[in-house]
Structures are given as C-alpha cells and as structure tokens.
C-alpha cells in the first residue's frame, strides 16, 4: 500500500508536477513514461539517494520497502539541463554524489537536497544558476504552435532537449491518454478509435510496449 501526494498551489514554467509517494508495505510498482525527465529523491531509514533520470520510453519496475519515500520532481519536456542533455539521458538514470547528509553535487554546484516543502526554492536555484533552462523552440512544438523554422531545425532541438523524436514523444502521449481512458471504463475499441490508432491490436501493442500493461490490466488498475 502506498500514498501519493501531489504538490498543489505552486506552478512553474519548468516543472510539470511534484509528487511524494510514501510506502506502508514492501512490494514493486511500474513507473510509466510521462514525457518528462525527473530529479528523484529516494529516502529510507538508512539512506538518501538523489537520482537524475532522463525521459523514458518504456515502463520501469521499482522495488520498495515499508517506510520508503520517493519525492519526484517532473520537469517539462521543454526544460533543458545542459550538463545532462536529453539526448544523453534517454532511458538513463544517474545517481548524484552526496555531500554530507543533506546536500549533493550537480556539476560544479552543491545543492541542498529538496523536500516536499522546499521544492519551489530548489527549482528557483536551478534556474538562477543556469543548471536548468527553457527551450522555447521545444515548448512551441509541444504546444502545437511550432516556431517558424525548418523542420530539420525543429527536430534537432526536440531530440537534443528531450532525447526522443517528436514522433516518439507523441506515441508516449497517446499511450498515456489510452491508459487514462481505459481506467475510466471506456471500451478498448472505442479508445483505439478516439485516439487515432489504426485498430485495436495496434493500440494494444503500443500501450503494452510503452506503458508496460495491456488494456485489460490498465482498466483494472
């Protein structure tokens, strides 16, 4: 059993969401692609681990124990970390070096490990120190209103920042939407049609490959 709390009342042009997950018992869970990259803090009774993850293209299984806590700061696809660009970080995770009990190193910067209550200040410092920047070209593509430039230039910006092509990104988005609709009880055939899949088998293959579940499993979750 676990409890998920989402940070409300704070928004950022760089951050998509902030969640804190607390585990009362041990087990395993699938972490599904969401089109974002993350800074993740894993805490248990003995250790703290700070992880920088890239955008993922398939579900990842995570084992947890009773008492574990995960703080996940999901950054928007247009947010860019020059030190660890998206094209290098796709489907990767890098454990960052700790400095004492409450700080970690990111490049030449030493930062305080954020808590659920201090995320806003942590993000402001990342931006102020140019650790995280905004790629307006990618933001324009994601919004559906791409800037006026060549298709090749747009695709180059998107791949370098996110680590995936725009086509792959939209496939992840569509699989996410499919899971949400299936969880709401929509029939699989209707979901496939509504989201523009070629047919229901195509949707089943795509959702399984990206989200790690079949439509039936998604509907029961």
Image (cartoon, grey):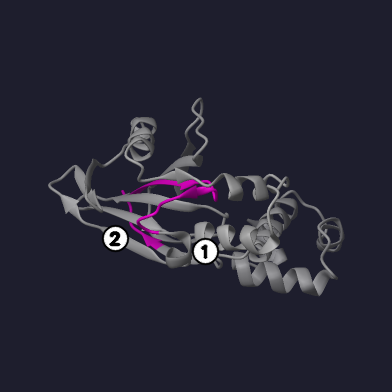
Residue 151 in the image: state x and y as whole percent: 69, 61
Residue 19 placement, left or right of 100: right
Tell me if residue 93 comes above or below residue 24 in the rendering.
below
Q: Secondary structure at mark 2?
A: strand
Residue 127 in the image: state x and y as whole percent: 38, 38
Residue 211 placement, left or right of 112: right
Q: Which residue is mark 2?
A: 95
Is 11 a magenta residue? no
Q: Is residue 4 visible?
A: yes
* The C terminus lies in quadrant: bottom right
Real-space Cα separation, disc 1 to disc 2, in angstroms: 19 Å
Residue 177 in the image: state x and y as whole percent: 71, 53
Q: Toward which corner of the image does residue 140 lie, by quadrant?
A: top right
**Mark 1 crowd level (few <14, some 14–19, many ≥20, 10 Å Cα):** many
Check if mark 1's residue and mark 2's residue have beta carbons within 8 Å. no
Q: Nearer the viewer, mark 1 or mark 2?
A: 1
Q: Secondary structure at mark 1?
A: loop
For the point 85% across and 70% down, which residue is it? 198
Q: Which residue is mark 1?
A: 163
Closer to us: 26 or 41 = 41
Residue 211 placement, left or right of 61: right
Which circle's residue, 1 or 2, is located before the other in the chain? 2
For the point 87% across and 60% down, which residue is it? 193
Residue farthest front in this picture = 149
Exactly how many numbered labels are in the figure? 2
Is 71 a magenta residue? yes
Q: Is residue 31 visible?
A: no
For the point 35% across and 40% down, which residue is it? 126
Magenta range is: 63-84
Q: Toward which corner of the image does residue 195 lie, by quadrant?
A: bottom right
For the point 36% across and 42% down, which residue is it? 130
**Mark 2 crowd level (few <14, some 14–19, many ≥20, 10 Å Cα):** few
């Amino acid at each position: 059993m676990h409890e998920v709390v989402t940070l409300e009342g704070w928004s950022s042009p760089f951050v998509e969401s902030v969640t804190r997950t607390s585990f009362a018992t041990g087990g395993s869970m699938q972490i599904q692609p969401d089109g974002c990259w993350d800074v993740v803090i894993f805490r248990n009774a003995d250790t703290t681990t700070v992880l920088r993850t890239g955008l993922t293209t398939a579900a990842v299984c995570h084992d947890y124990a009773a008492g574990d806590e995960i703080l996940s700061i999901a950054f928007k696809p247009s947010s860019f970390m020059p030190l660890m660009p998206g094209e290098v970080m796709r489907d990767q995770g890098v454990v960052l070096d700790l400095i004492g009990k409450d700080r970690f190193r990111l490049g030449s910067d030493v930062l305080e490990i954020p808590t659920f209550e201090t995320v806003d200040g942590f993000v402001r410092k990342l931006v102020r120190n140019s650790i995280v920047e905004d790629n307006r070209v990618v933001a324009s593509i994601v919004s559906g209103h791409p800037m006026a430039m060549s298709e090749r230039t747009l695709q180059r910006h998107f791949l370098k920042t996110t680590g995936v092509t725009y086509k792959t990104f939209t496939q992840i988005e569509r699989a996410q939407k499919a899971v949400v609709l299936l969880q709401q009880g929509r029939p699989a055939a209707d979901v496939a049609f509504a989201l523009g899949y070629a047919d229901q088998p195509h949707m089943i293959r795509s959702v399984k490959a990206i989200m790690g579940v079949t439509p039936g499993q998604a509907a029961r979750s």
